[in-house]
Image (cartoon, grey):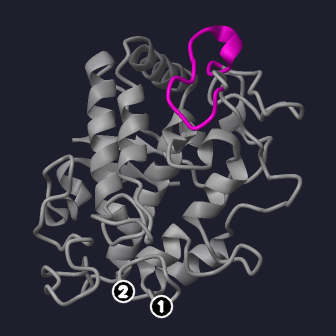
């Protein structure tokens, strides 16, 4: 059992240890498998086959297990390291300590988006981009998306999503008809021009490599999803009688049959059931504040 903390409360030593462990995982060649894995299991509504990482009910449990596996591997390098969380409703500016030179580094430069500061800047030699949809070998960001400005989600928007009592609803995808908590948080139910979409907007706000299936190329991915996981914890506390849906496999005549995983079916590639990770307290706790 260990504890995840708000990144703003990390000591200087904790920040350094987290960064060093992530860079060592990259140096050893083990980090990029997580980038490839996330891209491999990012399947959209219009594609055939199983949807597991996104646009489906397993968005929360799949990413919980994804973070657990990553975190455990970091702990083989430094057993005291955990994945901190980034509360983007509070630390919502480019000047937040999250983006300091000793932690995540700053924004990309205007000409090409290249991150020039911090331990993950290409010039340090520690963070080549080896897997992705572009040829650039350097990490990129475009915070706030100046050409079409957006802001990070607010506390009020998050409260509105947490108020939804249903975990998920048919048709269990990214369509507006899917009205549950999962789709609201993930960010497919409302267009960005109207506001209201949360997880996806954070990816868009950071920009660069955080946009798209290979988003773990940016280490801030883990801090974002650690907070997404904490949001799920908050929803579970707020709605103790609600749980993961669908609870049973969908029938053969359902359009989403074999595309959506129910509570006691295995999530690839981990071969872990959603029901096995519903209670985070078996693995870790959160220090909140």
The label shown at residue 262 is none
| Residue 179 in picture, x, y percent from top left | 46, 88
Q: Is residue 97 left or right of residue 28?
A: right
Q: Residues within 10 Å of mark 2 (few under 14, many from 20)?
A: some
In the picture shown, does residue 17 fall above or below 64?
Answer: above
At x 68% / y 69%, what residue is drawn? 154
The magenta region covers 119-135
| Residue 260 in picture, x, y percent from top left | 26, 72
User: Can residue 88 be spotted in the picture?
Assistant: no
- SS at mark 1 in the image: loop
In the picture shown, does residue 159 fall above or below 90?
Answer: below
Q: Which residue is mark 1?
A: 177
In the picture shown, does residue 77 fall above or below 7?
Answer: above
At x 43% / y 71%, what residue is drawn? 45
Dot placed on the residue nearer the N-terminal end, 2 or 1: 2
| Residue 266 in picture, x, y percent from top left | 13, 59
Q: Is residue 252 left or right of residue 165?
A: left
Q: Are marks 2 and 1 in contact (CB under 8 Å)?
A: yes
At x 14% / y 61%, what residue is drawn? 273
Q: Residues within 10 Å of mark 1 (few under 14, many from 20)?
A: few
In the picture shown, does residue 137 fall above or below 100?
Answer: above
* Residue 132 location, quadrant: top right
Q: Which residue is mark 2?
A: 171
| Residue 17 in picture, x, y percent from top left | 46, 20
Between residue 130 and residue 13, name the one nearer to us: 130
């Amino acid at each position: 059992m260990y504890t995840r903390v708000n990144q703003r409360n990390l000591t200087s030593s904790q920040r350094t240890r987290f960064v060093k462990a992530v860079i060592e995982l990259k140096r050893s060649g083990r980090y990029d498998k997580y980038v490839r894995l996330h891209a491999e299991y990012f399947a959209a509504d219009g594609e055939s086959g199983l949807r597991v990482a996104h646009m489906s009910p397993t968005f929360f449990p799949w990413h919980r297990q994804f973070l657990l596996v990553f975190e455990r591997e970091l702990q083989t390098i430094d057993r005291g390291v955990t994945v901190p969380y980034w509360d983007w409703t509070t630390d919502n500016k480019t000047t937040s300590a999250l983006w300091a030179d000793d932690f995540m580094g700053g924004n990309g430069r205007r000409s090409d988006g290249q991150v020039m500061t911090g331990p993950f800047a290409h010039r340090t030699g520690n963070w080549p981009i080896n897997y992705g949809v572009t040829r650039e070998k350097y990490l990129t960001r475009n915070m706030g998306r100046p050409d079409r400005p957006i802001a990070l989600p607010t506390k009020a928007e998050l409260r509105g999503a947490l108020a939804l009592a249903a975990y998920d609803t048919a048709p269990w995808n990214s369509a507006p008809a899917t009205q549950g908590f999962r789709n609201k948080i993930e960010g497919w139910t409302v267009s960005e021009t109207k506001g209201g979409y949360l997880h996806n907007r954070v990816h868009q706000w950071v920009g660069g490599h955080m946009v798209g299936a290979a988003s773990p190329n940016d280490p801030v991915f883990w801090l974002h999803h650690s907070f997404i996981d904490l949001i799920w914890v908050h929803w579970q506390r707020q709605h103790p009688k609600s749980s993961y849906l669908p609870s049973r496999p969908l029938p053969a005549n359902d359009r989403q049959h074999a595309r959506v995983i129910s509570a006691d079916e295995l999530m690839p590639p981990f071969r872990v059931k959603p029901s096995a990770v519903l209670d985070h307290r078996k693995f870790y706790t959160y220090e909140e504040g």
